[in-house]
Image (cartoon, grey):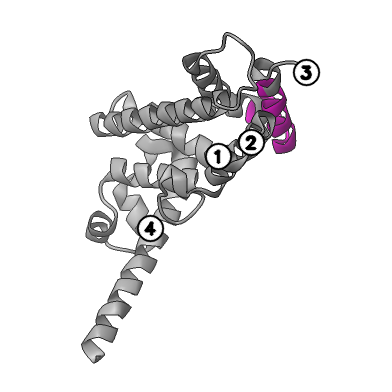
Amino acid sequence: MKRSYESEQRRAQSEATRQRILVAARALVVERGYRGTTIAELARRADVHVDTIYELVGRKPVILRELVERAISGTDRPLDPFERDYVQQITAEPDAGRKLDLYAAAMRRILERLAPLFLALRDASATDQEAAQVWSQISERRATNMRMLATDLLATGQLRDGLSIDEVADTIWATNSPDLHRLLVEDRGWSPDHYQEWLATSWRRLFLAEG
């Protein structure tokens, strides 16, 4: 019994250390970018040994991927898309307009967490092969998720005639990109509320049939 308790205690301590590393990593990446983030500096900020970072999280590309996954899920662990509350709500909603409203609200929350990390990953992919692989995987999955949403929207029968799954998916993919979020919210000073309202209204105008 004592051995089991001690083992559980060690696991809890390791997880707490892992979370501390990831919190410090996010702050460092946002502050200095991917290239400016070193494992040595991360170890200093998280108050751990460098080997502990490799053991509990991994190399820099793995760390960045973990940060992106956490930003998308909004939790301290990656989630399958169908585990996410907003995906379940969108799937259960019969009205296409409400589906778009729910997704715009979700993207507002996600991009507030994700945008600086996603852009750091994109920049890193230009010179780092491992980061490029992570970027490709995340980007492909994002495109796949847009296609799933487009399929769900078209199944309502409430979209304009002539729209294809590819067109709807690509339009959503482009308009909810971290780049556009940064341009509007950071560069142009839009409030998060304004961004969310614009996103939902734009999608309604682009996709929904009149009447």
SS at mark 1?
helix
Mark 4–mark 1 Cα distance, whole angstroms, equals 35 Å
Measuring 25% from the left and 34% from the top, which residue is drawn there?
130
SS category of the residue bearing label 4: helix
Q: Main secondary structure of the magenta part?
A: helix
Instruction: Say which mark, if any, is on residue 91.
Output: 1
Question: Is 108 on the left or on the right of 126, as rendered?
Answer: right
**Quadrant assignment for the C terminus:** top right
Q: CA distance from mark 1 to mark 2?
A: 8 Å
Check the image and report above or below for 12 versus 198: below
| C-alpha distance separating marks 4 and 2 | 42 Å
Boundaries of the magenta span: 186-203
* Extreme residue in the bottom direction: 2
- Residue 9 x/y as whole percent: 32, 79
Name the N-terminal-most of marks 4 and 2.
4
Residue 122: x %, y % from top left: 40, 28
Q: Secondary structure at mark 3?
A: loop
- Give the amino acid at mark 4: Ile
Disc on res. 211: 3
Crowd around label 1: few <14 · some 14–19 · many ≥20 (10 Å): some
